[in-house]
Image: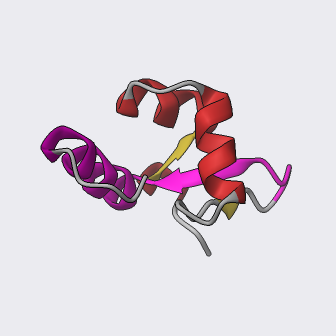
């Protein structure tokens, strides 16, 4: 079973990264980020560890996201 407290919604993740929700969805569609789907409603969820890594890449100017 997936522990949902280790994940953020699209809105939470976008706020955390300082980007729009549409940017997150685009990155997911382009395979730059990997979303997990909520088991009950199929909404996208993003793992906090993955988002922390992306935030570091954004802060250091690395390309990837």
Judging from the image, the colouring scheme is secondary structure
Q: Identify whether 11 is placed above or below 9.
A: above
Q: How many marks?
A: 0
- x, y percent for residue 64: 39, 59
| Above or below: residue 18 compared with residue 36 | above
Residue depicted at x 32% and y 55%: 63
Corner quadrant of residue 9? top right
Is 33 drawn above or below residue 14 in the view shown?
A: below
**Residue 28 in the figure: left or right of residue 52:** right
The x and y percentages for residue 32 are 53, 61
| Residue 41 horizontal side relative to residue 22, left or right | right
Q: Is residue 41 above or below residue 22?
A: below
Q: Position of residue 65 (x, y in %)?
A: 43, 52
Q: Nearer the viewer, residue 62 or 36?
A: 62
At a point 62% along the width and 29% down the height, the residue shown is 21
Q: Is residue 63 magenta?
A: no
Residue 54 in the magenta stretch? The answer is: yes
Image: magenta residue range = 40-60
Mostly what secondary structure, the magenta segment? helix
């Amino acid at each position: 079973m997936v522990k949902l407290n280790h994940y953020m919604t699209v809105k939470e993740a976008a706020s955390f990264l300082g980007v729009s929700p549409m940017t997150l969805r685009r990155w997911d569609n382009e395979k730059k980020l990997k979303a997990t789907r909520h088991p009950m409603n199929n909404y996208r969820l993003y793992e906090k560890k993955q988002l922390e890594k992306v935030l570091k890449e954004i802060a250091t100017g690395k390309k990837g996201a």
